[in-house]
């Protein structure tokens, strides 16, 4: 194939339509399942077990890939499928298992992870649209989380009880987390805009700063008086985001998920229908042209990281007010997972609403595999990594190819 045809093929991939990109992502997901299935079989063959979990072509294997992926995907939804529903075998029983409810605990965990990942995915995506690589969402989430927890603990004694207290404390906790995350995001923004510091380096380093400072605070001056572990005082009951339809013990609230969805829609509107969004997108596409058009790119850089940090801080506030009820060390890596969510979404806020549930399913399903099968957690982590790698890489290369064509003088004819 000639060089021009290779370039035309690459261009076709780079400028694929939304439908084509969805098809590519689904194909990548299926390919990751096939590769993961082979890996499960090989691992199951090399493992010693008293009884084979599956037999294929007369050969016994300790791990069954069909069971593993069933637990990974359907287990994360509470195992909705009726085992007697086998249309390919001519058995047409009801498709859903008797007694199954969408408000089960496994579904709650999936949606709980999804809600936080929407915020962290948006955080990274907004920065990416301005051509700013915010790798510090994890640190901004931690800062937002601890600030929200401390603020709510301080406001608790003066807040009214009942619904009135919730109407005061919940917005206050979200606002505190957003402000703290935004201010923390402003630090690498100012360093990049006015000192030409590489934001990748500064945001990565600030992740460690946030984690270490938080550890110092919850191990010392902010440590809960009656606790031997590093955690703050619990937030007031009125500050916990109320659970709707789901059991409160699952740590999930449909209200929080609704806030996450509305935030994604607001970000989409901001990026595509406001002056600030135009400046962010223009600076991201071509900074020199943006400056020529009168856009103050330095201010835009700082603004993009403030907004990005605020979204990460909101994720931290949701984590405290919906899941744990206080701040404690060992915050999950929602910020780093948000990078992959944003890449898969093509830095599109609406795409984040599609990408975040996939990662929520993977994380929840991994817990189900650990508790219901004998598959070692190390292998489960490898399977998770394979799915993330295969699904995210097409979008990563699409973005990389777009930069290649822009640097090469724009689009070419096929």
Image (cartoon, rainbow, N blue to C red):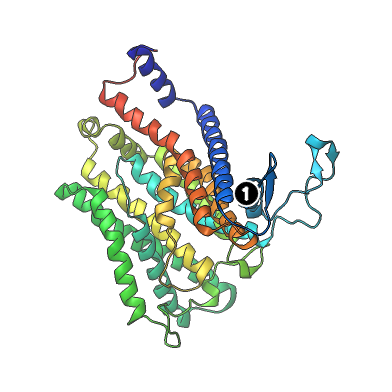
Q: Nearer the viewer, residue 163 or 178?
A: 178
At a point 46% along the width and 83% down the height, the residue shown is: 157
At a point 58% along the width and 63% down the height, the residue shown is: 252
Badge 1, how many Cα within 10 Å: few under 14, some, many 20+? Answer: many
At a point 46% along the width and 25% down the height, the residue shown is: 16
Q: Furthest residue to the bottom?
A: 226
To which quarter of the image does residue 315 belong?
A: bottom left
> In the rendered image, is residue 9 in sight?
yes
Quadrant showing the N terminus = top left
Q: Position of residue 92 (x, y in %)?
A: 84, 40
Q: Position of residue 248 (x, y in %)?
A: 63, 69
| Residue 294 left/right relative to 386 | left
| Residue 73 left/right relative to 185 | right
Above or below, comparing residue 251 to residue 76 in the picture: below
Q: Position of residue 58 (x, y in %)?
A: 70, 42
| Residue 223 left/right relative to 102 | left
To which quarter of the image does residue 250 belong?
A: bottom right
Element marked by disc 1:
helix
| Residue 265 left/right relative to 79 | left
The residue singled out by tag 1 in the image is 73
Above or below, comparing residue 168 to residue 154 in the picture: above
Above or below, comparing residue 324 to residue 403 in the picture: below
Q: Nearer the viewer, residue 291 or 207?
A: 207
């Amino acid at each position: 194939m000639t060089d021009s045809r290779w370039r035309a093929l690459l261009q076709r991939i780079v400028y694929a339509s939304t439908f084509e990109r969805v098809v590519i992502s689904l194909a990548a997901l299926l390919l990751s399942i096939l590769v993961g299935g082979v890996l499960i079989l090989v691992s199951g063959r090399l493992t010693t077990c008293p009884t084979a979990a599956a037999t294929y072509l007369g050969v016994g294997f300790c791990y069954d890939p069909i069971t593993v992926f069933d637990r990974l995907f359907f287990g994360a939804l509470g195992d909705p499928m009726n085992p007697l529903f086998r249309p390919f075998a001519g058995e047409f029983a009801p498709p859903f298992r008797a007694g199954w409810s969408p408000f089960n605990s496994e579904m709650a965990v999936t949606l709980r992870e999804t809600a936080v990942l929407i915020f962290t995915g948006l955080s990274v995506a907004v920065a990416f649209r301005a051509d700013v690589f915010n790798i510090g969402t994890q640190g901004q989430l931690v800062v937002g989380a601890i600030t929200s927890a401390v603020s709510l603990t301080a406001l608790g004694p003066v807040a009214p009880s009942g619904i009135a207290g919730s109407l005061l404390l919940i917005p206050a906790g979200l606002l505190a987390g957003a402000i703290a995350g935004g201010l923390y995001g402003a630090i690498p923004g100012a360093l990049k805009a006015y000192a030409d510091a590489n934001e990748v380096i500064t945001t990565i380093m600030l992740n460690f700063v946030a984690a270490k400072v938080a550890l110092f605070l919850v191990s010392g001056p902010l440590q809960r008086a009656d606790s031997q572990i590093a955690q703050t005082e619990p937030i007031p009951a009125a500050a916990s985001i109320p659970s709707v339809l789901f059991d409160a013990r699952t740590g999930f609230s449909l209200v929080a998920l609704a806030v996450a969805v509305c935030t994604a829609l607001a970000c989409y509107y901001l990026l595509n229908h406001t002056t600030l969004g135009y400046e962010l997108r223009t600076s991201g596409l071509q900074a020199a042209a943006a400056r020529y058009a009168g856009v103050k790119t330095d201010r835009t850089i700082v603004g993009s990281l403030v907004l990005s940090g605020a979204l990460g801080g909101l994720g931290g506030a949701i984590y405290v007010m919906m899941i744990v009820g206080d701040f404690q060390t060992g915050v999950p890596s929602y910020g780093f997972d948000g990078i992959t969510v944003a890449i898969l979404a093509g830095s599109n806020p609406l795409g984040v609403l599609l990408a975040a549930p996939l990662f929520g399913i993977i994380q929840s399903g991994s817990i189900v595999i650990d508790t219901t099968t004998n598959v070692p957690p190390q292998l489960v982590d490898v399977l998770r990594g394979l799915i993330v790698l295969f699904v995210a890489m097409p979008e990563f290369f699409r973005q990389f190819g777009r930069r290649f064509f822009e640097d090469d003088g724009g689009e070419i004819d096929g």
